[in-house]
Amino acid sequence: MNFNTALLHEGVDKKEKFGATLTPIYQSSAFYQQTADNLAGIFGNKAPGYCYTRVANPTISAFENRINKLEGGIGTIAAASGMAALFNAVTNIVRSGDEIVSSASLYGGTIDLFRDLEAFGITTRYVQNNNWEQIEAAINDKTRLVFAETIGNPSLDVTDIDKLAELAHKHGVPLLVDNTCATPYLIKVLEHGADIVINSSSKYINGSSNSISGVLTDSGKFKWDKERYPGLAEYVKFGPYAYIAKLRNGLFRNTGACLSPQTAFLNSIGLETLGLRMERECSNADKLAHFLEDNYKDFTVNYPGLESSPWHEIAKKELKHGYGAIITLRVGSKEKAFKLLDSLNIAYRLSNIGDTKTLVIHPASTISLHSTKQQQEDAGVFDDLIRISVGIEDFEDLRDDFIQAIKKI
Ligand SMILES: *Cc1c(COP(=O)(O)O)cnc(C)c1O
């Protein structure tokens, strides 16, 4: 099936009990069984079925199955937020003394999370994205994973996933990719060699900002070495399912950041229009980026679809259908950036991306506030920079809103 058809039909349970076309919301904390033996079987992972929503739930499974098909994985876990999915994805394979090698161009929350992990003896070595020599030099025998975002939020650099995966694998470690800004519409990173993909489904997958959630999907292809990953030793008998089995049986159920069934339902609705929305959002973003670059020479417009982007060639090679729907704009000073944000009438000033509506923010004073100045600059955040998450409005209205707001500065 092609992308949009697959969104509607792949991984969908067509044998729903009463024929509902979308798995209903099973708003139940727990599930009773006919016999104590059945319940024991479910708890022991020896029988199919549900026992407790923190562990699994039919509405959540329905959403997970669709994401799993979409990403081409062997197992997907949905969590209460993108951050929870990231935390689970990473801590499933690292322990005290281990190291992470990560692109420095990350979402601020992830930089904060990696700093929090230091208290548990897990350190992160930051490298410049796509700087192969620097990345290779940072990998050592303590490294347990390589991490990057496909399109860095908000620096908008584009990772060469094929190359990074090859490099990680050469050193016997997996590549974990946060694909939130690109979405599977632009790239299915598992097909490009990444081992685990994480999406904040609060963004484009949900699509209209009605709930927070995250998903992680395993390709099942990475061969876990028992010595290097002692935590996985008792799970390697599950072959490709080792990573997901460990997570489901351990940290994921024990840290308890499960999704709510209602959110899983809303996400399943959102997922069906991911392709349509992305098509429009990417097209609007491409037009707006070109318009701003062509007409405001004092500004620096950053968008992977612009030939002026240092990442344009990688983006052209790697991304399908478009270049994403996020633009950043440097306008000369923080004062001008604030004034511009305050003068926009259509775009919402808020901290989010991937909505149907256009959203704008000043990252340095908000989402990257807790990073150091150096971390901010490495992540492409400057005092005069605004980020625009382009929505599905009619382009002419968006353009006119920017024209009138820019006139004020
Ligand atoms: C929003 C975001 C996250 C965190 O997701 P939440 O759902 O807000 O927890 C992680 N990575 C990227 C790239 C994001 O944009």
Image (cartoon, rainbow, N blue to C red):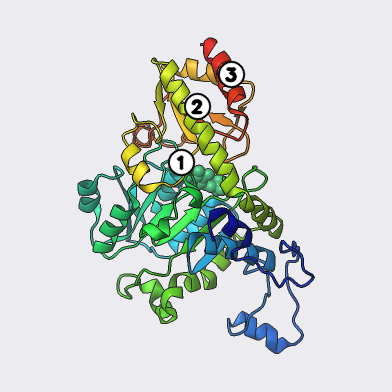
Name which residue type carries label 3.
Asp
Q: Which residue is drawn at 57% across and 52% down?
A: 81
Q: What residue did someone put label 1 on?
A: 322
Mark before the other along the chain sequence, 3 or 1 = 1
Q: What residue did someone put label 3 on?
A: 400
Badge 1: few (under 14), some or many (20 or more) residues near its Cα, within 10 Å? many
Mark before the other along the chain sequence, 2 or 1 = 2
Compute the Cα span from label 3 to label 2. Answer: 10 Å
Where residue 313 sits in the image (x, y, percent)? 31, 40
Mark before the other along the chain sequence, 3 or 2 = 2
Compute the Cα span from label 2 to label 1. Answer: 13 Å
Compared across the picture, whether 62 is left or right of 234 comes to right
In front of the other: 289 or 406: 289
Name which residue type carries label 2.
Leu
Badge 2: few (under 14), some or many (20 or more) residues near its Cα, within 10 Å? many
Q: Do the residues labelled 3 and 1 touch (CB within 8 Å)?
A: no
Outermost residue toward the front in this view: 1
SS category of the residue bearing label 1:
loop
Compared across the picture, whether 338 is left or right of 90 comes to right
Name which residue type carries label 1.
Gly
SS category of the residue bearing label 3:
helix
